[in-house]
Amino acid sequence: ELVAKFLDSADYLRCHDIDALEAIVKLCVESRQHSGPCRIGEWCARRLEAMSAFRLPHGYAVPMGVCIDCSYAVGRGIMKQSDRDAIRAMFADCGALDGLAHSHHLLSQCDAVLEGLDTWLRTDGDGAVELLAAPGKRVVEPSPDRAIYEEAIKDFLSESIGARQ
């Protein structure tokens, strides 16, 4: 329904028709409210992309988001450190974390990154975030802890800086 509405409204949106824009925004919010928990790494990836003025490709932003979600899962006692390390090493080995070199300035703005989580929690119906408990095993965190996420971002940033040196 959302794609069809975009297609039907394309001409109006190109002309900056405020009524068409309001209808699309309302439909997007309603769609998101019924989408369930945020997928692993998505809230963070979307925020990092926006903070970079969309210069950070999605293919780099999502692995960073997954790593941060995994660090959060370790902080909550949901995931073992060794599993988190293996996931991060896999991303690094295949080049998916190559965007880190250009993203330290984004990650160092912890409060700005966490605005992505805050936005997700405000706009989603239940505010839940999906996390990995182990490779192949997912759990839903019904109400994420912002303070633990802050530590996870700081840990990820310090480890990624340490890996570069």
Image (spheres, rainbow, N blue to C red):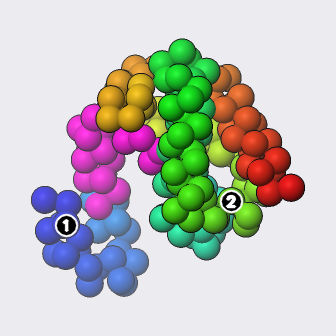
Location of residue 74 by image quarter: top right
* Stretch in magenta: 24-46
Location of residue 61 by image quarter: bottom right
Residue at the right extreme of this rendering = 165
Give the structural element (helix, strand or loop) at label 1: helix
Q: Which mark is residue 81?
A: none
Q: Residues within 10 Å of mark 2 (few under 14, many from 20)?
A: many
Closer to viewer: mark 1 or mark 2: 2
Q: Is residue 84 visible?
A: yes
Seen from the viewer's position, the closer of residues 136 and 12 is 136
Residue 42 located within the stretch drawn in magenta: yes
> Which residue is at a point 66% across and 32% down the rendered structure image?
152
- In the rendered image, residue 149, in percent from the top left (x then y), is placed at 63, 30
Seen from the viewer's position, the closer of residues 51 and 39 is 39
Location of residue 118 by image quarter: top right
Q: Amino acid at mark 1?
A: Val
Contact, mark 1 vs mark 2 (Cβ under 8 Å): no
Considering only order in the chain, which callout, 2 or 1, is on the residue closer to the N terminus?
1
- For the C terminus, the image quarter is bottom right
Residue 117 located within the stretch drawn in magenta: no
- In the rendered image, residue 98, in percent from the top left (x then y), is placed at 63, 65
Q: Amino acid at mark 2?
A: Leu
Seen from the viewer's position, the closer of residues 52 and 18 is 52
In this figure, which residue is indicated by the disc labeled 2? 100
- In the rendered image, residue 156, in percent from the top left (x then y), is placed at 69, 41
> Which residue is at a point 59% across and 26% down the rendered structure image?
81
Residue at the top extreme of this rendering = 77
Q: In this image, 32 relative to 131: left or right?
A: left
Give the structural element (helix, strand or loop) at label 2: helix
Q: Which mark is residue 3?
A: 1
